[in-house]
Image (cartoon, rainbow, N blue to C red):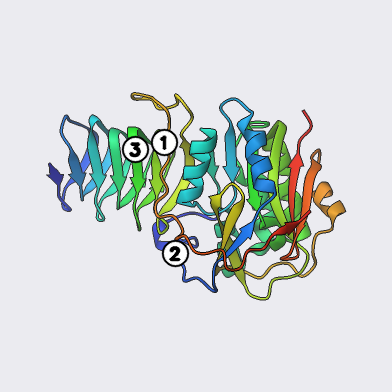
Amino acid sequence: MFGFGKKDRADAPAPALGPERRVATKVLPKFLAAVGQRASPVVLDLGPVVGSNVALLGERLGCKFFVEDLYADLYRAAHEDRRGELPATLAVRLTQADASVDGILCWDFFDYLDKASAAALGAQLARVLAPGGVLAGFFSTKPGPEPEFTRFVIEDETTLVHKPYRGVPRRDVAWQNRDVTLLLPGLRVAESFLLLTQTREVLLRKPA
Amino acid sequence: MNIGKSVVIKGELSGSEDLAIEGQVDGRIELRQNVLTIGPNGKIKAEIFAKQVVVLGEVVGNITASEKVEIRDNGSVDGDLTSPRVAIAEGAHFRGSIDMQRGGAVIGGGKPVAEAKPVAEAKPAADPKPAKA
């Protein structure tokens, strides 16, 4: 529905909107530990491709890595005034087989979605995640001041570099803890940390 | 060997020497012991098998390399990568999957070694945001 092409790349390099920030992560090492225990793991990344992330995950996990840049889809949909189509798009966007993914990096993508879109995506993430698999995500407790996305660059297992780039505004209302579990049916919150950035960093696990 | 901008090839392309493509290829490319470079003007719609693949142009199709795949700045790949080493520049476009599974390389094998390119520049931790549990 939202085609990709080099001439019209919403994920094309864009000037950074602000300074990058180095932020400690508590969830990433737990994510890596959980996925690393699985044989020939498969990781799904919902953000733009980041070479160093591919490098670290490949080295650390020896995994198969799917890049599905949903931020680019959202950006394109917003700028084509087609956000109303997002729930239907997200319901079929991921082509991975049921229970075929061991780890999902969804970053803060839910912070940009309305309820219907978030529910559609959450159902798909719950579908593709294998029993025992984990999902790592951020859920902000306040709307963003700027229409921007964040490129999350894994510097090492305990540090992320947040690089802002051109995007769309975050949703006005934060997801509550209860909302998060409702959005991802069948997943349980395994770890949750409130960062000083007023963002919850959450690891959810699908019971084996 | 170079394939120039004005050259269009439809079908299978195979060989035993390094190759740089600036033109168009639709089909299949096999250079299993050699380096394939897709130049900035190259437009490839093909399954690619090579020892090393360097992409500066556009590729639509799957790439299998026994040693390494590099997508340079402004390079574009829509397809799946299978290689023990993968380097993707920050300005590159990529959509697909990356298979660096141990023993997953189709040609050759060995332990995967991933490369970051370019990696965020190391900066002092001036503004760390420690988490509170």
- Residue at the spot 40% in from the left edge and 41% down from the top edge: B86
Can you say which quadrant of the picture contains the C terminus of chain A?
top right
Amino acid, disc 3:
Lys
Badge 1 marks a residue whose secondary structure is loop
Badge 2 marks a residue whose secondary structure is loop
The residue labelled by disc 1 is B113
Place residue A76 in its image quadrant: bottom right
Packing grade of label 1 (10 A; few <14, some 14-19, many >=20) is some
- Residue at the spot 79% in from the left edge and 42% down from the top edge: A190
Q: Position of residue A28 (x, y in %)?
A: 65, 46
Q: Is residue A55 left or right of residue B52?
A: right
Task: Give the spatial CA distance, label 3 vs label 1.
Answer: 9 Å
Q: Nearer the viewer, residue B48 or A28?
A: A28
Task: Give the spatial CA distance, label 3 vs label 2.
Answer: 24 Å
- Residue at the spot 16% in from the left edge and 48% down from the top edge: B7
Amino acid, disc 2:
Pro
